[in-house]
């Protein structure tokens, strides 16, 4: 294709005609309006698009200005339309305004007028303007606004906030709802990523870093982590953070990630509470099994022996009856002891809140050693006490006496004939908890063999004729009833150490 100038060829169009044809191709309404000092506005030019935008002719638009200024404009928008025009004229600022019109065919439409005013030498002001039909845009904006409102409502209802991490700057955007979870003012904010990391509970940090690292290394398609976060009140709350990488650089490295944060503190606390309840139920079931063992074995044995002797007494002679009555007395004594044990355990396990007092630990130990003075002297036991004089524990007096008495008598009962018995009482504070260790150099216990049944009822581990297998079971129940725990370390023929932890929290 060639272009050349031939003076003999002319299209005959004037410059004005050329501009008019050009403007008529523009989808917006193009017009020029002049304001004069007599406070009158006149429209001196309008493109043919006025037929489409305003559904009137060019002449009607130019000479029937009331149609433009009032008749077609939605009643509620007329005031603002004029105010914006006057503001633009007086300040010579851009006239940019949205308004609604009611058209005969198309009905309600949204329009936008934009104009740059210019003041002329004669004092008049010219507006070079255009009007666009923005109905589709407004409807889309409204849909977007409604969608955003629903989204924000859903986030609030679900106690969720939004985070947006720019890895190139290491700055994170936090939504208003997320700030509220932290106990801050409900207002969106930007913080370095270190701000968030510093608030994660130390015990949850390793798992948090692993889950996040796996996602950033593309081992997982999404990121999901549950951890505790420190709030401005100084307390930790459980949160669920979900998200994924949304942008990578040219080398495939992650540069941006987005996600949500949900407050699940109430749910997590219920879960923990449920877990504790399950543990209590399991513990109670274990205790019920012990009771079932007693009822099914010990009590049944006593009952069977009683019935057998009673049947024999019916046919026995006088001498045989006297001997059988002695057996009957032994069986009765055994039954009484068994029932007494059951009564003691029921009292421990059914007491809702055991009364605590502030007790001097060394003082109570001295009382126990005085009670057992003869036994200690008889076996030649060496006693070592490493408890400060002023150490106290919040405990039930009867329980403390029972616990100290049981561990001391066991140490004497199971002392080794191969060496002089030694018994040591040591106090220490471990992780903020008070702890008492009772150590001996006696026979020891094979924990690999008996560890799981050490504190079971009627469990004995040596052939001592006085062993009943009830002491450790009762002691463990007493310690746990006070919120504490027992640990044991033992080695055959070397000795045993029982460590009692005291829980002084309400």
Image (spheres, rainbow, N blue to C red):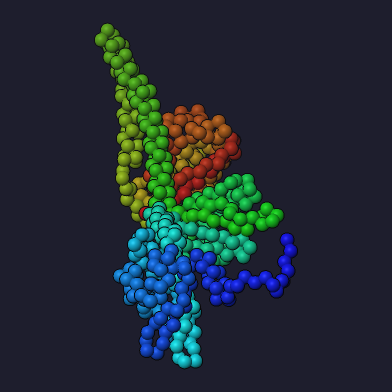
Residue 362 showing in the rendered view: no
Frontmost residue, 152 versus 393: 152
Whether 372 is drawn above or below 152: the answer is above
Residue 298 horizontal/vertical position (percent):
37, 24
Instruction: Report the residue that reaches farthest toward the left.
Output: 314
Image quarter for residue 308? top left
Residue 491 showing in the rendered view: yes
Q: Determine the residue positioned at 43% across, 63% down.
A: 52
Image quarter where the N terminus lies is bottom right
Whether 346 is drawn above or below 306: the answer is below
Residue 467 horizontal/vertical position (percent):
45, 31
Whether 35 is drawn above or below 216: the answer is below
Frontmost residue, 392 versus 377: 392
Image quarter for residue 288? top left
Q: Determine the residue positioned at 63% across, 48% down.
A: 218
251 on left or right of 360: right
Q: Total label count?
A: 0
Q: Determine the residue positioned at 56% across, 39% down.
A: 490
Whether 209 is drawn above or below 323: the answer is below
Residue 168 horizontal/vertical position (percent):
63, 63
289 on left or right of 20: left
Q: Determine the residue positioned at 36% across, 59% down.
A: 105
Instruction: Report the residue that reaches farthest toward the front.
Output: 8
Residue 171 horizontal/vertical position (percent):
57, 65
Image quarter where the C terminus lies is bottom left
């Amino acid at each position: 294709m060639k272009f050349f100038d031939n003076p003999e060829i002319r299209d005959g169009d004037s410059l004005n005609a050329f501009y008019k044809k050009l403007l008529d191709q523009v989808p917006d309404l193009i017009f020029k309006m002049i304001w004069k000092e007599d406070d009158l506005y006149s429209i001196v030019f309008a493109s043919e698009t006025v037929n489409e935008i305003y559904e009137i002719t060019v002449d009607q638009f130019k000479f029937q200005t009331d149609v433009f200024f009032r008749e077609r404009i939605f009643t509620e928008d007329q005031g603002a339309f004029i105010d914006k025009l006057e503001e633009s004229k007086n300040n010579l600022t851009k006239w940019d305004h949205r308004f609604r019109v009611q058209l005969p065919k198309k009905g309600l439409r949204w329009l936008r007028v934009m104009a740059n005013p210019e003041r002329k030498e004669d004092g008049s002001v010219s507006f070079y303007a255009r009007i666009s039909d923005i109905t589709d845009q407004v409807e889309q904006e409204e849909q977007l606004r409604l969608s955003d409102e629903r989204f924000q409502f859903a986030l609030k209802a679900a106690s969720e906030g939004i985070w947006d991490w720019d890895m190139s700057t290491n700055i994170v955007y936090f939504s208003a709802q997320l700030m509220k979870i932290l106990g801050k003012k409900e207002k969106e904010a930007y913080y370095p990523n270190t701000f968030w990391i510093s608030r994660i509970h130390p015990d949850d940090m390793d798992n948090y870093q692993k889950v996040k690292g796996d996602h950033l290394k593309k081992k997982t398609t999404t990121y999901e982590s549950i951890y505790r976060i420190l709030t401005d009140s100084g307390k930790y709350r459980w949160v669920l953070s979900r998200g994924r990488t949304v942008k990578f650089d040219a080398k495939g490295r992650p540069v941006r990630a987005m996600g949500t944060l949900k407050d699940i503190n109430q749910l997590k606390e219920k879960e923990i509470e449920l877990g504790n309840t399950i543990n209590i139920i399991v513990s109670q079931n274990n205790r019920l099994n012990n009771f079932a063992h007693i009822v099914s074995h010990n009590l049944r044995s006593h009952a069977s022996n009683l019935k057998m002797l009673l049947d024999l007494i019916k046919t026995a002679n006088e001498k045989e009856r006297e001997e059988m009555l002695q057996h009957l007395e032994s069986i009765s004594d055994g039954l009484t002891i068994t029932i007494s044990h059951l009564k003691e355990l029921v009292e421990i396990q059914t007491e809702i809140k055991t009364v605590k007092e502030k007790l001097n630990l060394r003082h109570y130990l001295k009382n126990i050693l005085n009670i057992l003075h003869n036994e200690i002297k008889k076996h030649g036991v060496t006693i070592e006490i490493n408890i400060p004089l002023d150490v106290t524990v919040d405990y039930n007096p009867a329980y403390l006496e029972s616990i100290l008495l049981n561990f001391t008598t066991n140490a004497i009962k199971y002392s080794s004939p191969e060496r002089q018995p030694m018994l040591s009482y040591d106090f220490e504070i471990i992780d903020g908890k008070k702890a008492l260790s009772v150590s001996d150099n006696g026979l020891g216990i094979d924990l690999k063999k008996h560890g799981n049944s050490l504190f079971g009822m009627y469990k004995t581990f040596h052939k001592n004729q006085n062993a009943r297998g009830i002491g450790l079971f009762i002691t463990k129940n007493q310690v746990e009833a006070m919120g504490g725990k027992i640990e044991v370390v033992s080695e055959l023929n070397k000795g045993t150490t029982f460590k009692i932890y005291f829980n002084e929290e309400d």
